[in-house]
Image (cartoon, helix red, strand yellow):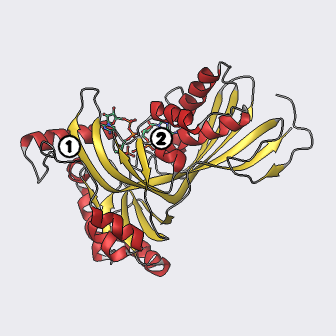
Amino acid sequence: MTAPHNPTTTPHHTHERLPSRLVSVTVQASAKINLYLRVGPLRSDGYHDLATVFHAVSLHDEITVEESEHLSLEICGEQAEKVPLDGDNLAVRAAMLLARRLGREPGVRIVLRKGIPVAGGMAGGSADAAATLIACAALWHAELPHDELMTLAAQLGSDVPFCVVGGTALGHGRGERLAPVLAAGPWYWVLALADGGLSTPQVYAEFDRRRASGDGELREPGDGEPLDVPAALLSALRDGDPKRLGSLLHNDLQDAAVALRPALGRVLEAGLDGGALGGIVCGSGPTCAFLVSDQDAAVDLAARLAGSGWVRAVRCATGPAAGARILARTAG
Ligand SMILES: C[C@@](CO)(OP(=O)(O)O)[C@H](O)COP(=O)(O)OP(=O)(O)OC[C@H]1O[C@@H](n2ccc(N)nc2=O)[C@H](O)[C@@H]1O
Ligand SMILES: Nc1ncnc2c1ncn2[C@@H]1O[C@H](COP(=O)(O)OP(=O)(O)O)[C@@H](O)[C@H]1O
């Protein structure tokens, strides 16, 4: 790799024109919460149809990609030791997929700074895939149409397209079909981080087992019944009403996650007893998200949860946050 000549690092947005030669690009990508998650039947391809409301929050990972002869990955930050360093890493897979699409070698050094809990139901790996697509596209001067970028994103995982766009969005299909949602804000969240992750396929499998055996109140949508998001939740989001939104948070996967990790029941109880307007398991868990009215209430609840003995760590976050966006670039 040649040393950068008189490097300049400037913030810029995805759609700006890039200088003629870049040697590194840094992208930030946000974690997500599913404010609502309704799971339809298991499809023949092994996925479930969903109706969900994705909401990006300020907890984030950061990825820097640099020109290099070979593809390599370094990881630091939150639970870095739990993240694969090989071809299973979603950042590596994203760089390889984009390189193949462009017909070039994937020579790039990827430095990943984790801030999103690993296997926490907050789409950390998907955020890294989205960030790497955006970063490598900029580094390699690939002017991909948005639709094509979103198609590549969906090939990497069901949550990756949302991680590209961020904000608040309706998700259908397996989660890759998106439509924007009007959501006032900011919304204040307290996140209860757990010791150890949960596997997404295992949580879906437990969900299927419970629904098939009639455990809990799970029911498949009937024939002709649309798999959809309640209008009341969309109107609470539009109106910026945290009390109403708090009472409408819902996750079909929650009971399965609690069955696999019973301590989550105590975490949810502790959050609601501590004054949250609503609490929910994030996606397939085990992170729990609690909605509160403002920053003071968030600090208050975070302190109570941290002292409860039921959580590994606590974070305060706000939403909606941006999707994958370029923070800095270095020109050679
Ligand atoms: C549950 C959710 C909710 O947003 O998020 P996480 O908890 O993983 O963050 C998602 O549906 C996870 O999406 P993602 O993590 O991208 O999953 P993928 O890599 O596409 O799929 C992993 C596995 O999850 C199951 N899967 C995923 C998506 C879906 N709509 N139906 C499924 O059954 C399948 O077993 C699949 O093989
Ligand atoms: N860049 C990455 N960051 C985190 N986990 C990753 C990454 N790439 C692959 N993985 C794998 O994906 C699994 C799910 O991690 P993650 O995406 O953080 O959680 P979730 O799917 O629950 O939102 C991890 O256990 C890990 O083995």
In the image, taking residue 85 as reference, residue 121 lies left or right, namely left
In percent of the image, x 41 and y 69: which residue is there?
238
Mark 2 Cβ and ligand 1 under 8 Å apart? yes
Along the line of sight, the residue nearer the viewer: 270 or 52: 52
Type of the residue with mark 1:
Phe
Q: Which type of secondary structure does the marked residue at label 2 adopt?
A: helix
Mark 1 Cβ and ligand 1 under 8 Å apart? no
Residue 45 in the image: state x and y as whole percent: 29, 26
Along the line of sight, the residue nearer the viewer: 48 or 264: 48
Q: Quadrant of residue 23?
A: top right
In the image, taking residue 319 as reference, residue 282 lies left or right, namely left
Residue 121 in the image: state x and y as whole percent: 38, 49
Cα distance between the residues tagged 1 and 2 = 22 Å
Question: Where, quadrant-wise, is the C terminus in this rendering?
Answer: top right
In the image, taking residue 281 as reference, residue 133 lies left or right, namely right
Along the line of sight, the residue nearer the viewer: 221 or 276: 221
94 vs 323: above or below:
above
Q: Dividing the image into four quarters, tell me where ligand 2 lies.
A: top left
In percent of the image, x 55 and y 41: which residue is there?
130
In the image, taking residue 230 as reference, residue 17 lies left or right, namely right
Type of the residue with mark 2:
Val
Along the line of sight, the residue nearer the viewer: 179 or 220: 179
Residue with the mark numbered 2:
160
Q: Quadrant of residue 209?
A: top left
Residue with the mark numbered 1:
207
Residue 76 in the image: state x and y as whole percent: 60, 45
| Mark 1 residue crowding within 10 angstroms, few (<14) / some (14–19) / many (20+) | many
| Mark 2 residue crowding within 10 angstroms, few (<14) / some (14–19) / many (20+) | many
Q: Which type of secondary structure does the marked residue at label 1 adopt?
A: helix
In percent of the image, x 66 and y 39: which residue is there?
135
